[in-house]
Image: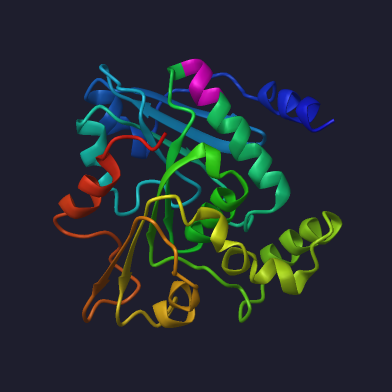
Amino acid sequence: MKAFRLLFSLLLVSSTVSAQSWEQPYADRGFTVQDTVICGRRAVFVVPKEANGRWIARPAFIGAFAQVDDALLELGWSFGLLDLMDEYAAPDAQEAFTAFCDYGRKRYGLSRKVVLEGLSRGGWFSLVYAENHPDRVDKLYLDAPLCVLTNIRNEHIRKAAEQWEAAGIPEEKFRTYAKDHFARVKGVPIIVVYGAADPTVPFEQQFGTFDLSGCRDLSIIGKTGIGHHPHSLSPCDTIVRFLARPERL
């Protein structure tokens, strides 16, 4: 049944529409740009003329603090986004992301393994997806990542919790899922960037609470005096070098 649902999800890809707003500068520079819908969510692909098959993808915040994306595009990488911003890694959202990745492989020859770029709440999805699909993730780039949901209450989280509940995971376990299952990705290279003065997603209450023992390849960069924004680094060479290392087999 799950295989059937995945196949059905792939059939829900709509036809390409013209590049607009955020994507237009990339189209003007000769990149292939597809802005479409996959499994009912907005999906974007940006592919250079001489693409090398490697790619980075976001689950949220298209165009925000895109220094790393732009640098990788110049190196022949492709970029993808599936807009799952308010879905908090609900089971349906994870299935949709798998369909999105499979579509990218089929249409653009992208690698099976993707670098996940999780900014803020996008960090939650990136971690949870990687924990459940470590064979599909090359590396994780987490920037001021939301990692535990214990103190957050909103309608989107409630809806996600209902899906998790239906899958047999109670809400209290869903809210700490990324932390509780972090051991599954200790073999995945991870780079974390955070603002040491971030009042919105304090590192010490989020990723800083994880058991990091046994991580094979982990880089953590704190920015003194910086809050939740700006994300990334300026220049972003350190992040790019970490991500651009040979793909994890």
Q: Quadrant of the C terminus?
A: top left
Q: Where is residue 73 in the image (x, y as percent from the top left)?
A: 26, 33
The x and y percentages for residue 6 are 72, 29
Q: In this view, does 119 lie above or below 24?
A: below
Q: Does the magenta stretch include residue 105?
A: yes
In reply to whether residue 24 is colored magenta, the answer given is no
Question: What residue is drawn where x is 56% and y is 24%?
Answer: 103
The structure residue drawn at horizontal position 25% and vertical position 48%, both measured from the top left corner, is 242
In the rendered view, how is the structure colored? rainbow
Q: Which of 211 and 115 is in front in this view?
A: 211
Q: In this view, does 39 lie above or below 236?
A: above
Left or right of 29? Residue 19 is right
Magenta portion: prevailing SS class: helix
Q: Give the range drawn in magenta.
A: 103-107
Q: Where residue 134 sits: x, y (%)?
A: 54, 45
Q: Residue at x 39, y 38 (%)?
A: 248
Residue 106 appears in view: yes
Relative placement, left or right, of 161 versus 196 is right
Quadrant where the image shows the N terminus:
top right
Where residue 97 sits, quadrant-wise, is top right
